[in-house]
């Protein structure tokens, strides 16, 4: 059984998923860009396509990726912290299930090129992969993005709330997005 098939068959946290199990991830051994987000939302859970929602539209805008490129696993790996939709909580979705990343991420990352660029989208991904930066706020991690290059690039989650955050932090659009697009172009 392939790793992708094993992930698709995973039921480790089924009892905690009110909308059912539907692991969603996309990757291949040639993907030079890895995008690690939080967990699929309700629209992605329905479609089975990673980032198939308004957040995905905004992420593609930020990165300069076309839909065709973003959904080409030979170029871009899409691997959330939790592979299944965790359900709703007050103010948004529940956090990704804690069982998922420890069980699968090491095996998935081992299949990817070592010199990949990893976009860490949101606090959950950043806290997991940048443990030395946990003492910083998400805003401070994103502002210090150069400190994590060439391997990692921290980003806010591109949910609708990011529009408000971007207004408060105009440096993101002026400084971070051009550097992000350049780093992404170098990998895909």
Image (spheres, rainbow, N blue to C red):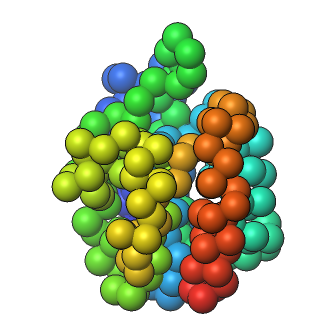
Answer above or below: position of 117 versus 121. Answer: below
List the single residue furthest toward the top: 90
Q: Residue 120: give x, y in percent of width and height.
A: 45, 58
**Residue 65: quarter of image:** bottom right
In the depicted view, which residue is nearer to us: 176 or 151?
176
Residue 22 image offset from top left, x and y in percent: 52, 41
Q: Is residue 11 visible?
A: no
Residue 102 can be seen in this image: yes
Image quarter where the N terminus lies is bottom left
Q: Nearer the viewer, residue 64 or 14?
A: 64
| Residue at x 70%, y 56% (from the top left corner) | 173
Q: Is residue 21 rendered to the left or right of residue 99?
A: right
Q: Which residue is pictured at 67% across the width and 48% down the height?
A: 170
Q: Position of residue 53 (x, y in %)?
A: 74, 43
Give the x, y percent position of residue 105: 31, 60
Q: Residue at x 51, y 83 (%)?
A: 32
The image shows residue 82, relative to residue 108, as above or below, that is above
Placement of the C terminus among the 4 image quadrants: bottom right
Residue at horizontal 40%, vertical 76%? 149
Q: From this view, report whether residue 23 is shown above or below residue 163.
A: below
Q: How many marks?
A: 0
Q: Quadrant of residue 106?
A: bottom left
Q: Nearer the viewer, residue 146 or 123?
A: 146
């Amino acid at each position: 059984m392939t790793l992708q098939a094993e992930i698709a068959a995973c039921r480790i946290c089924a009892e905690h998923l009110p909308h059912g199990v539907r692991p969603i991830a996309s990757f291949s051994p040639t993907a030079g860009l890895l995008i690690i987000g939080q967990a699929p939302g309700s629209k992605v859970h329905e479609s089975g396509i990673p980032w198939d929602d308004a957040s995905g539209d905004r992420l593609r805008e930020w990165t300069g990726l076309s839909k065709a490129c973003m959904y080409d696993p030979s170029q871009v790996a899409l691997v959330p912290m939790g592979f299944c939709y965790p359900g709703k909580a007050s103010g948004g979705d529940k956090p990704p299930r804690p069982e998922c990343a420890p069980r699968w991420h090491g095996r998935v990352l081992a299949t990817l090129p070592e010199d990949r660029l990893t976009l860490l989208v949101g606090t959950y991904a950043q806290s997991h992969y940048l443990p030395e930066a946990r003492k910083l706020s998400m805003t401070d991690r994103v502002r210090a993005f150069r400190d994590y290059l060439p391997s990692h690039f921290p980003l806010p989650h591109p949910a609708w709330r990011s529009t408000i955050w971007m207004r408060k932090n105009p440096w993101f659009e002026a400084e971070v997005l051009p550097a992000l697009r350049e780093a992404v172009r170098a990998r895909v």
